[in-house]
Image: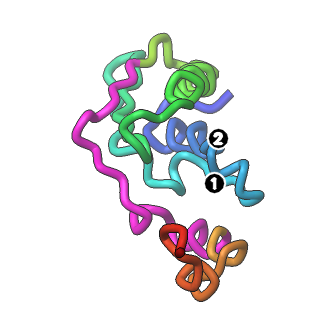
Amino acid sequence: MPEATTDTVLAALAKIADPCSIATGAPVNLVEMGLIEEVALVGGEAHVLLRFTAPMCWQAAQIVDAIRRYVLEIDGIDNVEIEVDPNGDWMPDMMAPEARERLRALRPLELASTLPLAPTN
């Protein structure tokens, strides 16, 4: 098992796909999505500051549970404190460029821009 460092915690978080991205056919992990604001280690405790893509994320409990399970697999981590930033507004430009390109390949901007925002009469 890896030793506890912020890099090993980030590597563990990179194993967790954002559940909503799975539905697109191009899974994007939490780190690539820009959902991890901060990781800190204090003794045997990992602190993860997290944001969601929407304030009422219906997958929040699943994401928090996965973070706890994956980070606790790291040697030297005895506890994981996960805080959700209530002011952590997420924007698509927070995604890693490679992840954005994978999603864009499935739904090109040209196509998206031709779709009406509301039904036309």
Q: Which residues are magenta?
A: 81-102
Q: Position of residue 7 (x, y in %)?
A: 49, 44
Q: Position of residue 26 (x, y in %)?
A: 72, 60
Which residue is the site of mark 1? 28
Task: Quadrant for the N terminus, please.
Answer: top right
Comparing marks 1 and 2, which lies closer to the viewer? 2
At x 42%, y 16%, the residue is 44
For residue 52, what is the image quadrant? top left
Image side of residue 44 versus residue 2, left or right:
left
Image side of residue 78 versus residue 20, left or right:
left
From what the image shows, is residue 87 above or below residue 102? Answer: above
Residue at the farthest left position: 87
- Is residue 111 covered in magenta? no
Q: Residues within 10 Å of mark 2 (few under 14, many from 20)?
A: some
At x 45%, y 12%, the residue is 79
- Is residue 100 covered in magenta? yes
* SS assignment at label 1: loop
Q: Position of residue 61 (x, y in %)?
A: 53, 22
* SS assignment at label 2: helix
Q: Position of residue 15 (x, y in %)?
A: 66, 42
Image side of residue 2 versus residue 119, left or right:
right
Amino acid type, residue under disc 2 in the picture? Pro
- Spatial CA span between label 1 and label 2: 9 Å
Which residue is the site of mark 2? 19
At x 53%, y 75%, the residue is 120
For residue 67, what is the image quadrant? top right
Amino acid type, residue under disc 1 in the picture? Val
